[in-house]
Image: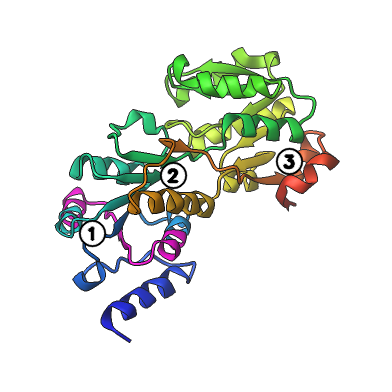
Amino acid sequence: MTGIAFMRDAWRRLLGTGGGALCLLWAAAAWVQAGGAAVIVSKDNAVYRAAAQTLAGCLPGASIHVLPESDAEADSILREVGAFEPRLLVAVGARALAECGGSFPGAPTVYLMVVSPEKQSLGPNAYGVAWLPHPKILADRIRLLCPGARRVGMLSIQPEIRLGEVAAGFEEAGLRLEVGRIGSVADVPDALRKLGPEIDALWMGVEEGLTNQEAFSLLKSYALQRKIPLFVPIDALARNGALASISISPRTAAAQACQVAGLLLRGEKPRDRLFHSPDVAVDWNEGVASAIGRSLPAEARALVREILK
């Protein structure tokens, strides 16, 4: 076995363990193919690790680099990546995307698992895979899981104009999106009180400032108290007290990112700047359903990946 093949095989074995740290096989310059793809990962955690496993399998020869917490160490890694002049960058997470934009402005880039990518300075050669389902698909899933829902509440820090596509997707599915404006997590209780009887379901979203334990606890308590469904974009939150998760799995997002990367590596231009995966996973929490007096509709059972007891 050649040295290059050995390094690739070792990397795949390490990624395939499913546990422990996401190892950084960085030092072997021979393994980093000049003119190939470089995958930049924001940090080592279980979610990014799952995406990296998929990327390693579908981008043969790509180098994979996990950014250390230290900015100085991260800069050093990015300089070494640049020395090999990769033809394509794949950024996993918001920090990786920001670092790629700063270190390699204008370079062809595919990003995934990024919250609010519109807040970043995206170059003309940046293409993304959305971390949320398309608004119409999301609304359709909510309608199937909660047939009686008509008004779905959502809290948002974003300007109203950025929620236009979401509201339009909900309207197309026969739902009305009711948005409570907040400036920080401290505003959540008051915003929920103002939504009050206007809503019969709640969607958490993935906005920066709301994807934390404090915000989730407030949303969960409110939904349980009012006995309304709380839908979340991350499957782990369905295990921790939401009624159901409606999500794009890390592996699904990475697989679609590989398709976009393949187009760019072949010199083809993707048709869109942002891609939404149609492959949406639904997990249902039976314990929460019982607590709020709900049951899984028969017509929605085929959509559910896992029923949590």
Question: Residue 161's quadrant in the figure?
Answer: top left
Kindly identify the amino acid type of the residue bearing the numbered disc 1.
Answer: Gly
Mark carried by residue 174: none
Q: Earlier along the polypeptide chain: callout 1 or callout 2?
A: 1
Q: In whole angstroms, how far apart are the C-alphas of marks 1 and 2? A: 25 Å
Left/right placement of residue 92 relative to residue 17 reads left
SS label for mark 3: helix
Residue 73, magenta (yes or no): yes
Vertical position of residue 213 compared to residue 21: above or below: above
Kindly identify the amino acid type of the residue bearing the numbered disc 2.
Answer: Met
SS label for mark 1: loop
- Residue underneath mark 1: 35
Q: Earlier along the polypeptide chain: callout 3 or callout 2?
A: 2
Q: Which residues are magenta?
A: 53-77
Q: Earlier along the polypeptide chain: callout 3 or callout 1?
A: 1
* Tag 1 and tag 2, C-beta contact below 8 Å: no
Determine if residue 222 is in view: no
In this rendering, the label closer to the viewer, 3 or 2? 2
- Residue underneath mark 2: 113
x%, y% of residue 198? Answer: 68, 14
Left/right placement of residue 246 relative to residue 56 reads right
Q: In whole angstroms, how far apart are the C-alphas of marks 3 and 2? A: 27 Å
